Amino acid sequence: MVNKLPEDFTLHRYGIDVRLVNEDDAEFIIKLRNDDRNSKFLSKTTTNIYEQINWIREYKIREKEGKDYYFLFSFNQMPVGLYRIYNIENDSFVCGSWAFKPDSQSGLGILGCIIGREVAYEDLKLEKCFTDVLVDNISSISFQKAFHPKTLKTENGKIYFEHYKENFYKYKDKFIQICLKLNNNGSN
């Protein structure tokens, strides 16, 4: 049985508010994913607001089925980032579409990734995490490797990783502490 998140899922952790994306977020998603500083490492997305709204509507169907979740992160009541857990099947998931405003506080993007994986492991009771990163995205590759994943392959300009739940919990606290010190926002 697949665990599911409630439609009104919200979370406050590490000073960040988290909720599921909704249609009202279409403009933010377009701006963030098409920002030149973010877009070179992300799949291209539409700049048409109506197409983005329709994409969100279809996403919400997969969300209700427990297959995909798209999260919006806010800091000080301002949206700052996005993260997806998708292709949920049996006990595994893929995480990605990890994008935070380039001018957001230091460490928020890392905390967002950690929160996303915590939700997958704790709330959804999933066990295996897969990621793929463009070979040119050196900072993301370094972050992924800090959790000691298995490198599955390098293909078509991407590196594919399989992450182990026990390694995530072994190394995540180090990153949380660094990020909280950067922002001095240690509230949970």
Image: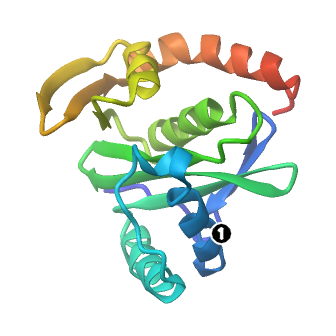
Q: Quadrant of residue 3?
A: bottom left
Marker count (numbered):
1
Eyeballing the image, is 29 above or below 126? below
Q: Position of residue 127 (x, y in %)?
A: 34, 34
In depth, the one of 115 and 48 nearer the eye is: 48
**Image position of 151 (left or right of 5):** left
Quarter holding the N terminus?
Answer: bottom left
Q: Residue at x 47, y 77 (%)?
A: 56
Q: Position of residue 38 (x, y in %)?
A: 51, 47
Q: Position of residue 121 (x, y in %)?
A: 45, 37
Eyeballing the image, is 165 above or below 33? above
Which three-letter amino acid code belongs to the residue tagged 1? Answer: Asp
Q: Hey, which residue is sitting farthest bottom in the picture? A: 50
The residue indicated by pointer 1 is 8
Quarter holding the C terminus?
Answer: top right
Q: Position of residue 109 (x, y in %)?
A: 62, 36
**Image position of 35 (left or right of 43):** right
